[in-house]
Image (cartoon, rainbow, N blue to C red):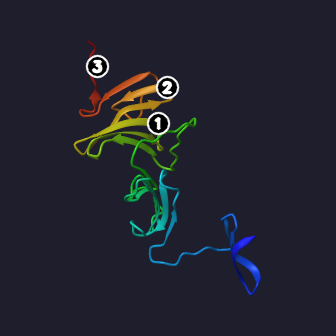
């Protein structure tokens, strides 16, 4: 038998708490507060969980956990209302997906698709130094370039239908390796030791 039941004029259940403790909510469930929270406590030996809005992050939807021994809640996932950016391990995501930590993919591919020059960049926290792989949409070649002390050095390495270019974005179709001295706009020197 039910231990608690809420309905409207005896018709149409809104909330039912059964004798076995199972709670059923019909229709919408709303928490009306400037920073609403919903807690799930799992016992003294497990993590407790909190789902909240604007508890720590302004305009943020947050999922956080608390250690079994108690203490502060730590946000694991944040979604910002204005930008829609999602943060995992960070409360201030700068991009659509911002992960503070390592990422492992067990599928067969990672695709970066954009209408104009999609890139994959690697680097540390100093954005003046980095390495980038870019698909040049205008010429349909794959380019690798670097940034050193804030200056971009493009055409470090270009792949074009099996041909390789160094210092040029359009390697010759008649040679497998095309090296160009971009600084003096002349032929480059190849040194072998």
Q: Secondary structure at mark 2?
A: loop
Q: Is residue 166 visible?
A: yes
Residue that mark 2 sits on: 162
Residue that mark 3 sits on: 190
Sequence-first tag of 2 and 1: 1
The residues bearing labels 1 and 3 have C-alpha atoms spaced at a distance of 23 Å
CB within 8 Å, label 2 to label 1: no
Camera-side residue of 133 and 177: 133
Residue at 29 percent of width and 46 percent of height: 125
Residue 136 is situated, as x and y percent measured from the top left of the image, at: 45, 42
Q: Which quarter shows the C terminus? A: top left
| Disc on res. 86 | none
Residue at 28 percent of width and 19 percent of height: 190
* Residue 167 position by quadrant: top left
Number of marks: 3
* Pointer 1 local density, CA inside 10 Å: few below 14, some 14–19, many at least 20: some
- Up-down relation of residue 70 to residue 187 (above or below): below
Residue that mark 1 sits on: 141
Camera-side residue of 128 and 47: 47
Camera-side residue of 142 and 180: 142
CB within 8 Å, label 3 to label 2: no
Q: Secondary structure at mark 1?
A: strand
Residue occupying the far top of the picture: 193
Residue at 24 percent of width and 45 percent of height: 150
Residue 192 is situated, as x and y percent measured from the top left of the image, at: 28, 14
């Amino acid at each position: 038998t039910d231990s608690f039941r809420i309905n409207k004029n005896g018709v149409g259940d809104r909330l039912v708490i059964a004798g076995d403790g199972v709670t059923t909510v019909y229709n919408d469930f709303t928490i009306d507060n400037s920073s609403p929270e919903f807690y799930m406590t799992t016992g003294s030996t497990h993590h407790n969980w909190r789902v909240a809005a604007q508890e720590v992050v302004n305009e943020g939807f947050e999922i956080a956990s608390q250690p079994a021994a108690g203490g502060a809640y730590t946000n694991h996932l944040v979604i910002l209302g204005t930008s829609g950016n999602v943060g995992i391990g960070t409360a201030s995501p700068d991009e659509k997906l911002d992960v503070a930590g390592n990422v492992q993919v067990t599928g067969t591919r990672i695709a970066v698709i954009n209408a104009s020059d999609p890139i994959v960049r690697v680097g540390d926290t100093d954005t003046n130094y980095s390495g980038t792989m870019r698909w040049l949409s205008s010429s349909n070649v794959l380019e690798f370039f670097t940034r050193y002390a804030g200056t971009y050095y493009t055409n470090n390495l270009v792949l074009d239908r099996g041909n390789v270019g160094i210092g040029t974005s359009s390697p010759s179709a008649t040679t497998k390796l095309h090296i160009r001295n971009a600084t003096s706009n002349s032929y480059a020197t190849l040194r072998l030791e």
